[in-house]
Amino acid sequence: PGRVAGIRFERMELDGTGNVRGTGEFEDYPVQAVYRAIGYHGSELAELEYDVHRGVIPNDGGRVLDAEGNPVPGVYTTGWIKRGPVGLIGQTKGDAAETIGRLLEDRDSLPPAQEPDEHAIIALLEERGVEYTTWEGWNELDAHERSLGEKFTAESAEHGTVVQRERVKVVPRQDMVRISRRHAS
């Protein structure tokens, strides 16, 4: 009642015309959640090349490329802006690992930071009014989402159906930032 209990797949077969048709043979799998993933078309940045048809920044394994196909020193991309709106978290992790690998390969030839002080990035973000979080803030958000999962589990038990949730994801960015910055100085 109002909750996902499973997902059903129907076995398909070729129909001889290049299409498929259902066979009437179904396979059911119990699940507690279904996730919808919708892609989006990336946005260009004025100072970088952009493939308007694919919605990506041209790159080679994460190294951003200029108009001639040469790597732009110190500029990398990952995720959907790197490869387009395809894949889920697992693919995104592998994709990020590839980009980090390129970054590590290039580390000795990267241009030096204009401001090498480790706190310079925080000062720049604050100067620009960018709301950011720290590792401690991420841990705060993680603890909050886990507590929401515990609350959901307890409430489901009160209604006679125990549905265990490790966490309930906070989705709106402004809520994530607010929660992760609760104890920021």
Image: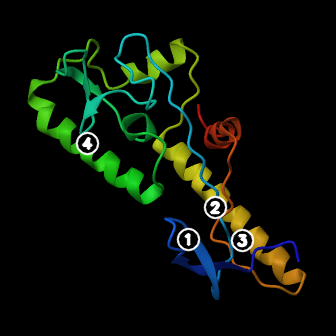
On residue 178, the disc is none
Amino acid type shown at disc 3: Glu
**Crowd band around label 2 with a 10 angstrom C-alpha radius: few (<14), some (14–19), many (20+):** few
Q: Earlier in the sequence, mark 4 or mark 2?
A: 2
User: Along the horizontal axis of the image, is 148 left or right of 64?
Assistant: right
At x 52%, y 67%, the residue is: 17
**Relative to 125, is 135 above or below?**
below
Real-space CA distance between mark 1 and mark 2, rounded to the nearest whole angstrom: 26 Å
On residue 20, the disc is 1
At x 17%, y 18%, the residue is: 111
Mark 4 sits on what residue? 100
**Relative to 157, is 59 above or below?**
above
**What x and y, as percent, mark residue 41?**
53, 32
Amino acid type shown at disc 4: Ile
Mark 3 sits on what residue? 150
Quarter of the figure with residue 60: top left
- Name the secondary structure under disc 4: helix
**Crowd band around label 1 with a 10 angstrom C-alpha radius: few (<14), some (14–19), many (20+):** few
Quarter of the figure with residue 90: bottom left
Q: Earlier in the sequence, mark 1 or mark 2?
A: 1
**What x and y, as percent, mark residue 179?**
67, 43
Mark 2 sits on what residue? 35
User: Along the horizontal axis of the image, is 119 left or right of 110?
Assistant: right
Depth check, mark 4 against mark 2: the one in front is: 2
Q: Which of marks 3 and 4 is nearer the N terminus?
A: 4
**Relative to 42, is 167 above or below?**
below
Can residue 156 be seen? yes
Q: Which of 174 and 88 is in front in this view?
A: 88
